[in-house]
Image (cartoon, helix red, strand yellow):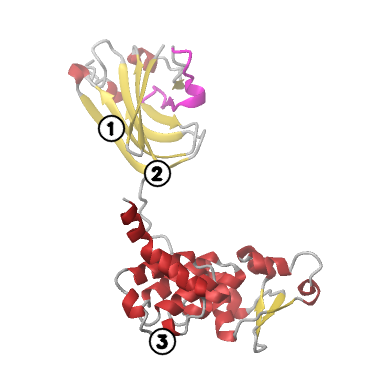
Amino acid sequence: MSSINYTTRTEGQTRINTILWTVPNFINLLENKSTREFRTVKTQDQSVDLTDSRFQLKMQFLGRDNDIIEIYYLSPNPVFLKSILTICLKRFEERSIVIKEYHTVQANKWQYLATLFKRDIASYDGREIFLLSDGSLRLKFQFMVSNDIKVDRTNVPEAQLSNDFENLLNNGLFSDVTMKSAEGNEYKVHKAVLASRSVVLKAHFEHNTTECYTNVVESPLESEVLREVLTFIYSDKAPRVDEIPEKLLAAADFYQLSRLKSFCEEALHKKLTVENAIETLQLADLHSAKTLKQLTLEFIKDGQAKLITKTEGWAKVKSVDLIKVIYEYIMADDFEADIK
């Protein structure tokens, strides 16, 4: 009866499973030509079941005289692992037999690991080479299971999904609805794509709406803006966001495209100056662009307030509420300092 010693430890994102498999009287096992396979069995610890929760091991004996020993392992779960097989020798020495770098392993499928030869277990002159002093064969398996391995993907083609969907927009293939700009320009599009990206557009095709019967969606957006919005919907890209961020912010808010809205807020923040700070703040407030509004208020507060009150934008402010927001934001820290 063989014995199993199973230990585990964790290093960072890697779980290292170490198994010591000791097979006593191994030469006798090899000489028994009726034995063609030898597997690990349940551990003596009744709380641990190798067949259910841990790696299993087996040897297959090949050749007329069991001259070849193939070693396999089985994982109960799909894993990404590195495996090392070591033979334990006399005088506490060890010899690595095989090291397999990280690769994906299927669950409950025997995986080939290494081959041993009978001639290496014991030489013809009777010397035991790979056996311990008591005649047992001891193999040490290390299975390093990781969730944080960077796979070399240099030979993997770049993702084409974004480009493929953009081509679908450009060629109108299999389109089932027409979208019209404010000027009347038409774009051949697809209900499923529009509905999956925008809850506003999805609402056009639900229930008994006019669009359900006509398969035409009238958009209030100008052609250049609508085209950019559709490009984003299909490809998740906004190539002109730095050119027309104000118009795109309004469009993103209208169609509830939060990611496009974030792109626009970032572009407007990059363009923020003393001269356009008030206009930017009004735009952010109008379209509920909370991040842009916060960043603009911080810009105004950061030593720019006096300069901004001399701009044309400030002179045109008609919203008392907006002036109140600016004032309260600027004065907040001073008020808190007075309290302390």
Q: Residue furthest left?
A: 91
Q: Residue at x 33, y 40 (%)?
A: 100
Tag 1: amino acid: Ile
**Mark 1 surroundings within 10 Å by alpha-carbon count, few (fewer than 14), some (14 through 19), many (20 or more):** some
In the rendered image, the quadrant that contains the N terminus is: top left
Q: Residues within 10 Å of mark 2 (few under 14, many from 20)?
A: few
Residue that carries the numbered disc 2 in the rendered image = 103
Work out whether 21 lies above or below 75: above
Q: Nearer the viewer, residue 262 or 98?
A: 262
Residue 92 coordinates in the image, percent (x, y): 20, 19
At label 3, the amino acid type is Glu
**Which residue has dot 1 on it?**
97
Q: Quadrant of residue 35?
A: top left
Dot in front, 3 or 1: 3
Q: Residue at x 65, y 86 (%)?
A: 182
The image quadrant of residue 328 is: bottom left
Query: Which labelled disc corresponds to residue 312?
Result: 3
Where is residue 337 drawn, in percent x and y?
Answer: 31, 55
Q: Please state which amino acid type lies under the numbered disc 2.
A: His
Across and down, in percent, residue 202 comes to: 68, 66
Between disc 3 and disc 1, whose residue precedes? 1
| Magenta span includes 49 | yes
Q: Which region shows up in magenta?
A: 45-67
- Does dot 2 land on a helix, a strand or a loop? strand
Give the answer, above or below, for where 35 lies relative to 274.
Answer: above
The answer to which of 173 and 333 lies nearer the viewer is 333
Q: Secondary structure at mark 3?
A: helix
| Nearer the observer, 114 or 272 | 272
Residue 156 visible to an observer of this rendering: yes
- Quadrant housing residue 170: bottom right
